[in-house]
Each structure stands twice: as structure tokens, then as C-alpha cells.
Image: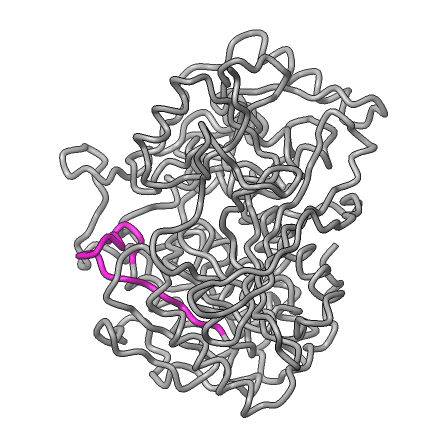
Amino acid sequence: MNHRLAIPYCSHWLLLVVLLSAGVVFSPVCHGGPPEQPEDSGAASVPSTPPPSAAVDRAESVETAGDAAECQPVVFTTQEDHQHLLDLLGIERLRPGRSASGDSPHAANYDEALANPFNELPELMRLQDGTSVTTAEQWWQQRRPEIIELLEREVYGRVPEDVPAVQWQVLKSERKKLGEVEVTEQRLAGVVDNSRCPEIPVTICMQLTLPAGTDRPLPVLMQFGFTWFDAQGEDLEFSGRRLGGPRGPSKAQILAELGWGCATVNAYSIQQDAGGASPRRNDSSPGSGGGLTRGIIGLCNRGQPRRPEQWGALRAWGWGASRCLDYLHTVPAVDAHRVAIDGVSRFGKAALVTMALDTRFAAVLVGSSGKGGATLLRRNFGEAVENLAGSGEYHWMAGNFVKYAAEQASFGSMTPNDLPVDAHMLIALCAPRPTFISYGVPEQGDAQWLDHRGSFMAAIAAQPAFRLLGARDLGRSDDYWTELPPPPGEGLLDGQLAWRQHHGGHTDLPNIPHFVQWVERLWDEQGAPTPPPAATAPPP
């Protein structure tokens, strides 16, 4: 029997092996995607030879097919798509990514004395023409748009202007108990108009859990995660057993007990976490394995490979979260002006990008995000720019980002120090809204690979923007070279910019109660959140 379902990344590898042996086919529809690889799995591989001739022929056809009315999706493997991007950029060779293995010749550095090879960060409070930014008006009308332009062009990519519309439908609604709290749980599908390319369906899947019986609209924490239901909203099952659900109290239960709602957005239903298609057992349909020519990125490109300035998965996941926020604005039981965004690991990167670029989100909890998120890209500690540019992670970023790992190219070579932006500028775009940066400890599994110190340095360097806009910062000096994070368990939670390292592992669950208490206090102090000046166009 061919059981068609999807298993998101989890620790249940034995279950995965059993399912594969039974002929399970993984699908991105409404319930996740293929299992992820851990971010610290070693140096990202870089193809040393050109793709097969058939792939070259397909890539060359893109130049003439991109504007064609007919949709003819390309099917690339990850290696083929990565090589195609390198060819577009004129890159002959990338520097190898760092490895988490200490025995590797490319082992990651964990020596703080070697962690800062570059002397300065790009100036946050200075316009590109050299003018100092000293007023809120300058920030909103000039500096913020400059930073967004650089981040979109060089790091995360541009969202197309003509992204198709989304129509929401409730698949299933039920009352249930989470712990001792009665809740209403809705399973929702946001169907993207795919008339431009019917071969590429995209359905955003979201689960909304709200405490029942309240007499006021509730704040909601929207998290990137996984939804465990099929296209009809029914529980996933295999051999009569229900799949999904965390061990112990879920984030939705913890939030419900605190009087909050929880919206879980299935990131992989928006864009799969891979650059190219992966062979699937018992499924020979073209492009069944996803990649950048599928999902919302592929749909907008009519199934063709993306151009270097176009968006990667982090930006695509953020676009999907914005569409979920659109829906929450239609739900009377939700206080749509108090919706926060949350994620851990690669989803922590996505949460920070989403918060920075969609000012409708009222707060953010950035969990263990590492490089590409809250950690400085210029740091030589743990994961490196070369990992983000390699074939295992490049799909998160704009194609242009790969240039900064080039060892040999038509333009010479580039390093992280050539980047016109860094993580402190991404964090600054969240100001003055509440921004909570969360990590665990390496002893419990929140690996040094993530470079906790590099995130703290970025937060310190972002402080001037928060102060300029009337918000309180971390309460430290702006000297990011010398300021050190507090010990785990001791947070810096007095201002709109916050930091706390809990005693757990690669999760943000231990910080959820601290986040809720912190943001509720700030909201009570400032009253109803008001949107910032419309310095940039609203998200598409």
C-alpha cells in the first residue's frame, strides 16, 4: 500500500525508517515536508563539477521560457539548482563551509580570540551618503528603507510584486482540552491562486488554538512549526496510529494556560526546506520532491529557477506568515494588533526576518536563530557564511548572498566583510516593537555552533535604533566588543529589546512564560500598539 503523508523533522528516526520501508511518499500538502538535516551536520557540500548536460540544457532554456505564458516547470536536484546559481553569478569555486566535527580540516572555530577577524560592523545610524541619523523621521523615511533595500537585494531576496492572492477556508473546528484549559482549535488552509501555473499547487496550512469562553479578543503567538493534519483537516494516521503532537505540554497548551492563543504556521506548506527536488519512492510525478522551482517561489516563477536577487525560503516563510496575519485580522476572537511571531533554529531566522519586514507584527520571540538570524555574519565562530552559501542552506537566502562565500569568481573573491549589512541592522528594523532574543545552553543541546555571543553582540549594536525611537534597550553600553551576556537564567528584560538564555536546549519553551510576562508589561505601559509611519509599502 502506498501511504501518502509528510513527516516533519523530529527525533523519531525509527518511525521514519519504518515509514520509508513501507513505501510512504512524503508530500508538502498541509502537513510539513521532508525531514530536515540538523544545521550543525557539517560542512556544506559544493559541487566540483558542472551539472549533467541535461540539466545544462534545461537551465539554458530558462532564458527564453521565463516570460512564456505556458508553465513548464523545471525539475532540478539541489546540486543542479545550486550549480545553476553559481553559473549565473559567475562563481567558479566557493570556500568550504565549517564542520561541526573537530577532526575535519574545516572544523568550526570556537576560540573567541579568533572569532572577530573584521574590525568594524556597518554603521547603523548613518545614511549611505554619510549623514548621521539623529531623528525618528530620518530613520523611518531614509535609513530604514536603505537597510531594507540592502537586505532584500543581498541577503534575503525580494518578494515579487505580483504574488498570487490567498483564499482561506476552515477545514475543521473543534472544542477540546489542553491540560485543564478548554480551547477551540481550528485547522485552516490558505489556498494560493495557482492559475498562472496549475502544475504547482500551494496551500498554506495553519492551526489556530484559542482559549474558549473569553469575553475579549486575545493576543496570539504565531509560530513557525508543523501541522499534523491532511488536506481535509483530519488527523494523520499510519497503520491505525495517529501521528504528531509534542511530548509533554505543547506551546499551545502553555500559551492557553497564560490566556494567549497560538497559531502554528506550517512553513513547509509554503516552501519546502530544500533547493531542489528529491526522489520520492512510488511517486514519479514531475517535481514531486519540491525545491525552489516549486512552492510559492516556484509558483511565482512559473516553475523556473530563481534569479539571484529573488527571495529564498526565509523570506517566503515570512510572506506566508504575513498572509496568516491577514486571516487573523478577520477573527473577532483575536486581538490582531497583539500578534507576535516566533520560531526556533531556522524558523528563528524566519521569525526575525518576518518581524523586521512586516511592521504589523507586535512583538517577536527569536529562538536559537544563529547566522542568517540574530548572529553577526562577520563572526568566525561556529556556523559560517560559507555554510549558508553551500548547497545545504543556500535556499534560505537570496541567490546574491552566495557571492560572499566566493573564493574564485569572475568578480574575484568576496568575504563576509564585503556585506553592506549585518544582523544588528536586521534586529534594528524591529524597533521600537518588543524584540526578545532567546537561547538555551550548549550543555543541554543549544550548540556553540549557533554563536550565542555573536547574537548578543548584534543586539548590543542594535541598541541605538531602539533608543532613537523612544524604546528602552538592554541597559548596556553600545560597546559590542566588550559587553558580555548575563549568565543563563538572568535575563535583560527591562526594555523593548530583551535577551535571555534559559537552562534548556534547542528550544524556546522555557522562555515562553518570561516572554509573555515581559511583553504584557510593555503593552500595558504603552497602551494599544500603534503601527509605525508608513515609510515603506505594506507586505504583498
Q: Is residue 323 left or right of residue 521?
A: right
- Residue at x-position 56% and y-position 38%: 399
- Residue at x-position 85% and y-position 25%: 69
- Residue at x-position 31% and y-position 78%: 491
Looking at the picture, tell me which residue is in the foreground, 112 or 265. 265
The answer to whether residue 280 of the structure is visible from this angle is: yes
Q: Is residue 261 left or right of residue 473?
A: right
Looking at the picture, tell me which residue is in the foreground, 451 or 189. 189
Q: Position of residue 330 (x, y in %)?
A: 76, 65
The answer to whether residue 83 of the structure is visible from this angle is: no
Quarter occupied by residue 221: bottom right
Quarter occupied by residue 41: top left
Start and end of the magenta stretch?
Answer: 435-451
Q: How many marks?
A: 0
Q: Is residue 444 above or below residue 11?
A: below
Residue sitting farthest toward the bottom: 525
Q: Is residue 75 above or below residue 358?
A: above
Is-magenta flag for residue 337? no
Q: Position of residue 355 (x, y in %)?
A: 57, 64
Looking at the picture, tell me which residue is in the foreground, 445 or 182. 182
Q: Is residue 501 above or below residue 448?
A: below
Q: Position of residue 416 (x, y in %)?
A: 41, 49
Quarter occupied by residue 446: bottom left
Q: Position of residue 194 (x, y in %)?
A: 78, 35
Quadrant location of the C terminus in the rendered image: bottom right
